[in-house]
């Protein structure tokens, strides 16, 4: 396949201009680099034959201060980070509270009905609770004292409390 110029696709320019552009793209001593020209919208872009469109480059700014954020930007980012930590803490509290509620309901219902609580569903749910602890251990460890004082208190079922104590024992 021969080289086609932008003007061929865009419908402009003379044959001489097209030939000059093609010569510039070929490189030194007429070597072919395999450049194809494709039309994107109203603009044409050169693309290497195997590589696709060339990436856009950002304009480089001069000066050392261009890359540094202002104090106001730093303060805003710190506030956003703090808000994200608060949201994360709330989310973990909600998740663990729901695990406790669901497991407690199951244990109470099995106790009142005189059935064995250790069902497949119960083992799967406790396993999932353990998985949440382990997958997010770094974040959960930050909130372990809050979790212990608000959720994993002595008044919940010992089976559920054991899962939390196992997690804290692993992390200490």
Image (spheres, rainbow, N blue to C red):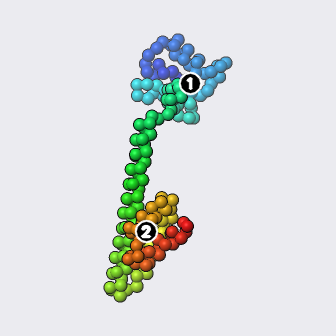
Q: Which of 40 and 95 is in front in this view?
A: 95
As helix, strand or loop, the secondary structure at mark 2 comes to helix
Within-10-Å neighbours for mark 1: few <14, some 14–19, many 20+: few
**Residue 128, x across and y down, in percent:** 45, 68
Q: Where is residue 105 in the image (x, y as percent from the top left)?
A: 34, 76
What mark, if any, has residue 2 been given in the picture?
Answer: 1
**Vertical placement of residue 17 versus 115, above or below:** above
Residue located at (51% from left, 21% from top): 5
Q: Earlier in the sequence, mark 1 or mark 2?
A: 1
Labelled disc at residue 106: none
Query: Does the image show residue 120?
Result: no
Q: Categorize mark 2 by other alpha carbons within 10 Å: few (<14), some (14-19), many (20+).
A: some
Q: Is mark 1 on a helix, strand or loop?
A: loop
Query: Residue 75 location, x and y as percent?
Result: 42, 41
Q: How many labels does the image show?
A: 2
Q: Mark 2 points at which residue?
A: 148
| Residue at (65, 19) in percent of width and height | 28
Q: Can you say whether 115 is above or below 37 in the image?
A: below
Answer yes or no: do the residues labelled 1 and 2 have beta carbons within 8 Å?
no
Towards the viewer: 112 or 157 = 157
Residue 7 appears in the picture as rendered: yes
Percent of width and height locating residue 153? 40, 73
In the picture, the quarter occupied by the C terminus is bottom right
Q: Going 50% across and 32% down the picture, which residue do you hit?
A: 67
Q: Is residue 130 above or below residue 17?
A: below
Nearer the observer: mark 1 or 2; the answer is: 2
Which residue ends up furthest to the bottom in the rendered image? Answer: 114
Cα–Cα gap, marks 1 and 2: 72 Å
Quadrant of the drawing holding the N terminus:
top right
Q: In this view, does 165 lie to the left or right of 96?
A: right
Q: Which residue is drawn at 56% across and 35% down?
A: 51
């Amino acid at each position: 396949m021969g080289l086609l110029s932008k003007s061929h696709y865009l419908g402009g320019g003379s044959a001489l201009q097209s030939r000059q552009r093609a010569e510039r793209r070929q490189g030194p001593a007429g070597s072919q680099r395999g450049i194809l020209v494709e039309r994107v919208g109203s603009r044409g872009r050169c693309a290497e034959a195997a590589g696709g469109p060339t990436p856009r480059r950002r304009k480089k700014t001069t000066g050392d201060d261009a890359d540094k954020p202002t104090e106001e930007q730093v303060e805003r980012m710190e506030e956003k980070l703090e808000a994200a930590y608060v949201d994360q803490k709330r989310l973990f509290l909600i998740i663990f509270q729901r695990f406790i509620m669901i497991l407690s309901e199951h244990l109470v219902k099995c106790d009142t009905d005189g059935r064995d609580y250790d069902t497949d569903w119960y083992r799967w749910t406790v396993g999932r609770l353990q998985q949440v602890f382990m997958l997010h251990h770094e974040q959960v460890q930050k909130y372990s004292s809050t979790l212990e004082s608000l959720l994993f208190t002595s008044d919940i079922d010992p089976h559920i409390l054991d899962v939390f104590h196992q997690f804290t024992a692993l992390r200490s």
